[in-house]
């Protein structure tokens, strides 16, 4: 990565949801801001801007990261996936999204993209988790609306826990 001076903008290229894109970023621009304001993918939400709430979670080279704690320049040449990548190209929801719909696991939906992205990563590495493991991953997210019961029901459905 090339060294950039404060206030200087640099051209940044990455793959976002399977598409090679580029845009200009200042050295301190956050990945969340770059995704939303430069590239126009607004499904990634920003809540606390401290990495606590989990709303901004995206996949960076397949690993869940808080995009509000990641500099845009750190994503140079890398693969970024947001919630917009989860449904099929025809709009069909994936298994996790469908379970969320089935169990009304969202109300305002603000936290939902981050939760979906965290579990996309987690379930890719652990497709048969226990309920306790689901709860541990979910504890990294703050939802102010649902009380988590619907979210847990959806997660359990998605992984086949009765």
Image (cartoon, rainbow, N blue to C red):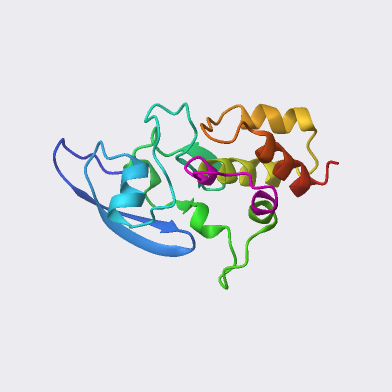
Q: Quadrant of the C terminus?
A: top right
The vertical placement of 128 against 148, above or below, is: below
Residue in the foreground of this view, choosing between 120 and 74: 120
Q: Residue furthest left?
A: 7
Point out residue 136 in the picture as x, y percentages from the top left corner: 67, 27
Point out residue 31 in the picture as x, y percentages from the top left corner: 36, 43
Q: Residue furthest right?
A: 162
Magenta span has 74?
Answer: no
The vertical placement of 159 against 138, above or below, is: below
Residue in the foreground of this view, choosing between 97 and 38: 97
Magenta region, main secondary structure? loop
Residue at (33, 57) in percent of width and height: 40
Looking at the rendering, the stretch of residues picked out in magenta corresponds to 99-113
Point out residue 47 in the picture as x, y percentages from the top left corner: 40, 34
Residue at (44, 65) in percent of width and height: 19
The vertical placement of 97 against 126, above or below, is: below
Point out residue 30 in the picture as x, y percentages from the top left corner: 32, 39
Residue at (49, 52) in percent of width and height: 82
Quadrant of the rendered image containing residue 64: top right
Q: Residue furthest bottom?
A: 90
Number of dots carrying numbers? 0
Residue at (82, 46) in percent of width and height: 160
Judge from the rendering whether residue 109 lies leftward or rightward of residue 95; answer left or right: left
Judge from the rendering whether residue 63 lies leftward or rightward of residue 19; answer left or right: right
Judge from the rendering whether residue 23 lies leftward or rightward of residue 128; answer left or right: left
Quadrant of the rendered image containing residue 92: bottom right
Magenta span has 100?
Answer: yes
Q: Quadrant of the N terminus?
A: top left
């Amino acid at each position: 990565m090339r060294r950039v001076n404060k206030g200087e903008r640099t051209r940044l290229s990455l793959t976002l949801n399977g598409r090679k894109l580029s845009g200009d970023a200042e050295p301190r621009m956050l990945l969340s801001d770059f995704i939303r304001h430069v590239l126009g993918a607004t499904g990634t939400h920003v809540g606390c801007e401290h990495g606590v709430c989990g709303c901004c979670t995206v996949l960076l080279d397949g690993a869940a990261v808080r995009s509000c704690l990641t500099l845009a320049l750190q994503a140079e040449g890398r693969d970024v996936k947001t919630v917009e990548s989860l449904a099929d190209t025809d709009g069909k929801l994936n298994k996790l999204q469908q379970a969320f719909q089935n169990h009304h696991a969202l109300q305002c939906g603000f936290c939902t993209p981050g939760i979906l992205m965290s579990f996309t990563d987690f379930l890719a590495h652990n497709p048969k988790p226990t309920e306790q493991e689901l709860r541990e991953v979910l504890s990294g997210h703050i939802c102010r609306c649902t009380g988590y019961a619907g979210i847990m029901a959806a997660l359990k459905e998605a992984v086949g826990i009765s």
